[in-house]
Amino acid sequence: MQDLTQIIRTIPDFPEPGILFRDITPILHDPIYLKAAVDKMADMLKGIDFDYIAGPESRGFIFGVPLAYNLAKGFIPIRKEGKLPCDTLKKSYSLEYGTATIEMHADAITKGSKVVIADDLLATGGTSKAIVELIEEAGGEVVSMIFLIELISLKARDLFEGYSVHSALRY
């Protein structure tokens, strides 16, 4: 297993002063590390019964689609408002400076579907919380949430008491 922490770049003061940005693009660039990251996330799903992986654009797509492919599951794209062509379900949530809205196709989940949320980063948890609410309002059950990286000092995990939350790397 490759040590993924060796290749992740830490960029100080991005996107604003005081922030340490964890840059995963070197993982995406290197096929050995990319495979190691996807495999590590797939390992977190061993023994979990589920139907779909849901991932937010754009980096949730990067990890969610290969996971769905490798595990023979469907993938549900969670997109920014206005990007999906059919009837959608929407969920707005707060950002540091404003709000955002995510959508998924209204027919993406049937009642009782078991869903895993996959993304690259768990930071403040706002996007992930909105995804959980969107899936549950559609009649789905979130059975696990997996992330490549978790920023533990932001304590987003506290938002998900009662949910199965896993991260490959914790900073």
Image: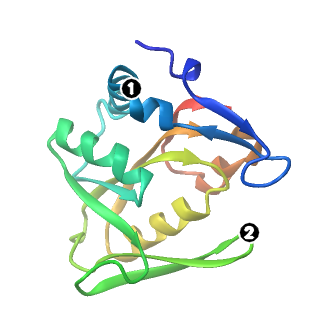
Tell me the SS state at disc 1.
loop
Instruction: Give, as a three-letter code, the residue at label 2.
Output: Glu
Mark 2 neighbour density, 10 Å: few (under 14) some (14–19) many (20 or more): few
Residue 140: image x %, image y %?
32, 66
Whether residue 49 is visible, yes or no, is no
In the displayed structure image, the side of residue 108 where residue 6 appears, left or right: right
Mark 1 neighbour density, 10 Å: few (under 14) some (14–19) many (20 or more): few
136 above or below 37?
below
Which quarter of the image is occupied by the N terminus?
top left
Residue 13: image x %, image y %?
79, 46
Residue reaching furthest to the left = 72
Residue reaching furthest to the bottom = 87
Foreground mark, 2 or 1, reads 1
Q: Could you say which is closer to the camera, residue 86 or residue 133?
A: 86
Which quarter of the image is occupied by the C terminus?
top right
At x 25%, y 41%, the residue is: 66
Give residue 170's quadrant in the image: top right
Instruction: Give, as a three-letter code, the residue at label 1.
Output: Asp
At x 62%, y 30%, the residue is: 9
Whether residue 171 is visible, yes or no, is yes
Give residue 99's quadrant in the image: bottom right
Residue 118: image x %, image y %?
40, 48
Q: Could you say which is closer to the camera, residue 106 or residue 10?
A: 10
Residue 141: image x %, image y %?
35, 60
Circle 1 residue: 30
Circle 2 residue: 96
Give the distance between the C-alpha atoms of the residues marked 2 and 1, in whole angstroms: 32 Å
